[in-house]
Image (cartoon, rainbow, N blue to C red):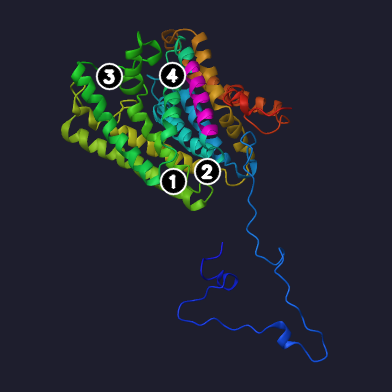
Amino acid sequence: MRHAGLGTAAGSGSHLPGRAPRAVAHPAATRAPGHPPVLPTPRTAAARPRPAPVEPPADPAVPRPSTRLVGIDVARAAAVIGMLLVNSGPKELEGPATTAWALAHGRASLLFVLLAGVGMTFLTRRRRGRALAGLLLWRAALLLVLGVLLGMLDHRAQVILPTYAVLFVVALGLVHLRSRWLALLSASLALLGPLAILVVLQATGREYVRDDAAAAPDLLETLDRLVLTGPYPLVTWAAPFVLGLALGRLDLGATRVQRALVLGGAGGALASIGLSELLVAGVGMPTSPAGFDHLVVMTAHSQMPLWLVGGTAAGVAVLGLCLLAARRPASWLWPLVATGQVALTLYAAHLVVLHLVPERPHLDAFGFEVPLAVVMTSGAVLLAVLWARLRQDAGPGPVGPLERLMRPPWEHRPA
């Protein structure tokens, strides 16, 4: 677009201030002797400067594979594999297996929610107004129903989907905020959300026990667990989601952005661990049921600020690493890409499988937790690869069964 007053001055009759307009000789006055006069012709449409063509709005049902960042799928695969490992893996054993479990514990869920925010920003690029609201409300309703149903199973795990559903509704009021306000809101939630939880627990004389919202006896208790005292309370878990909304607006395909995510995320994670160690060394571990002395800990799923900031920062670093790794096509990444594209389906399926396996004490007694974790994670990747091969000719669109269900029926294109 030309700058007003410069590129359009000659065509509009305007001129620069302080300079007289230049006289232009009439074509008839400058004709050569013996030649007929050249009559002025009106400017035709071809001679007028044409505005840049306006691209028609993209069909929301058709993705743009040329601009897809497969590194997002790889990061989503890392998140869902980590959650499978945490829910099925060893908790009390010594050695590398428990170390892997401890690294994924809590951080995998935070990465999952962070990526939900990034994906939400991608959705808003193709939809606006009623189309966006209808899509988000549809997904929120399905995720809430699915989360409640999965929460009724005996899998000894906490279900994150009800919180997902609430975040999708909350996103309707957040997607129009500027990035700086999203970053400020995320930081505020990470700092003030834990304080709100502690204040409520102290006022009601309770401890933080992470009861699932799906098992609440009444509506009031359900809301309390969803917002404040459940395993994934909205006041704290909205922080990584809102940060993801802001990160999704960056040029995630740029190498400098990807490196900044890695360095900034790793620095934030290490700083949180170091600060927690210093505070614990100075004031000791918390001794009260729900006092402010809990603010110093880095315990997974404690909902405390240092854990929340450190775990989210680790997720940012993992996102940057996955984007860097996927810059060049590599055959070893393809199974992870396939896994990330069916993350919701695999998450729901693994809870059903855990519902069917024997009680955890039996697994502990016979040392079956490590084999179970290996079978669960490797089996999930294998199933994702097989599913991708089966539907490789199905064309563009959501990949997994539950992912396809997340598309509203009014967006399905006729065959």
Q: Quadrant of residue 394?
A: top right
Residue at image coords 71%, 25%: 390
The residue that label 1 is drawn on is 261
Query: What number is the disc on residue 207?
Result: none
Q: Amino acid at mark 1?
A: Leu
Relative to 246, residue 169 above or below: above
Q: Secondary structure at mark 4?
A: loop
The residue that label 3 is drawn on is 208
> What's the magenta region?
130-146
Residue at image coords 25%, 27%: 196
Mark positioned earlier in the residue sequence (3 or 1): 3
Relative to 88, residue 9 above or below: below
Query: What number is the disc on residue 159?
Result: 4
Q: Amino acid at mark 3?
A: Tyr
- What's the distance in space between the residues labelled 1 and 2, CA to CA? 10 Å
Q: Say whether marks 2 and 4 touch (CB < 8 Å).
A: no
| In magenta stretch: residue 131 | yes
Mark positioned earlier in the residue sequence (1 or 2): 1
Q: Say whether marks 3 and 1 touch (CB < 8 Å).
A: no
Residues 32 and 147: in front is 32
Which is in the foreground here, disc 2 or disc 3?
3
Q: Say whether marks 1 and 2 touch (CB < 8 Å).
A: yes
- What's the distance in space between the residues labelled 3 and 1, CA to CA? 32 Å
Question: Does 283 sit left or right of 347 as displayed?
Answer: left
Q: Secondary structure at mark 3?
A: loop
Q: Secondary structure at mark 2?
A: helix
- What's the distance in space between the residues labelled 2 and 3, CA to CA? 36 Å
- Quarter of the picture holding the N terminus: bottom right
The residue that label 2 is drawn on is 323
Q: Say whether marks 4 and 1 touch (CB < 8 Å).
A: no
